Image (cartoon, rainbow, N blue to C red):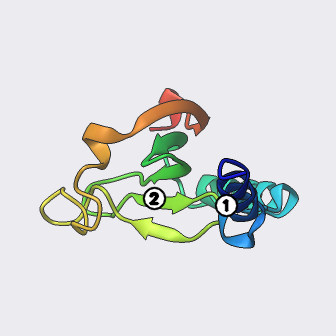
């Protein structure tokens, strides 16, 4: 009987809302991403790439030149940080480990070399 109570407690913890996986609206995510890529193309961004960073899918938007910040967004379109760019080229300092820890999953958009 002593084994049964911890098992029930464990099941209770698993069923509580705090432990449930977060539900996401993939349709809204896809709409945000599609719209953002279209805007990036119009603004002359060189690339939009998908990465895995700190266990989450993120999107890196690379600007066309120089001192402009790159932009790193989470899957819902919330700006996380600017990992590169600016006067120092090191971004805003909010995610200095991005270059070392992020794993590129795939390119979603890349400008033709002829247009650079």
x and y, in percent, of residue 75 in the image = 63, 57
Give the residue at x 87% y 57%.
Answer: 27
The one nearer the camera, 19 or 59, is 19
Dot 1 surroundings within 10 Å: few (below 14), some, or many (20 or more)?
A: some
Give the residue at x 24% y 62%.
Answer: 91
The disc at residue 72 is 2
Please state if 16 lies on the left or on the right of 104 as rendered: right
Give the residue at x 67% y 56%.
Answer: 10
Give the residue at x 25% y 50%.
Answer: 97
State whether residue 81 is above or below residue 112: below
Task: State how many labels appear.
Answer: 2
The one nearer the camera, 24 or 90, is 24
Please state if 27 lies on the left or on the right of 90 as rendered: right
Q: Gap between marks 1 and 2, in whole Å?
A: 12 Å
> Where's the C terminus, which quadrant?
top left
Mark in front: 1 vs 2 = 2
Q: Secondary structure at mark 2?
A: strand
Label located before the other in sequence (1 or 2): 1
Please state if 89 lies on the left or on the right of 54 as rendered: left
Q: Residue furthest front?
A: 1
Q: Secondary structure at mark 1?
A: helix
State whether residue 106 is above or below residue 42: above
Q: Which residue is mark 1?
A: 36
The one nearer the camera, 26 or 77, is 26
């Amino acid at each position: 009987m002593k084994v049964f109570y911890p098992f029930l407690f464990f099941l209770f913890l698993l069923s509580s809302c705090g432990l449930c996986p977060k539900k996401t609206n993939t349709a809204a995510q896809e709409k945000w991403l599609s719209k953002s890529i279209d805007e990036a193309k119009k603004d002359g961004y060189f690339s939009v790439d998908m990465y895995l960073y700190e266990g989450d899918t993120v999107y890196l938007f690379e600007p066309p030149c120089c001192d402009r910040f790159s932009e790193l967004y989470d899957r819902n379109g919330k700006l996380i940080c600017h990992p590169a760019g600016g006067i120092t080229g090191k971004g805003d300092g909010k995610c200095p480990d991005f270059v070392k820890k992020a794993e590129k999953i795939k390119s979603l958009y890349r400008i033709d070399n002829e247009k650079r």
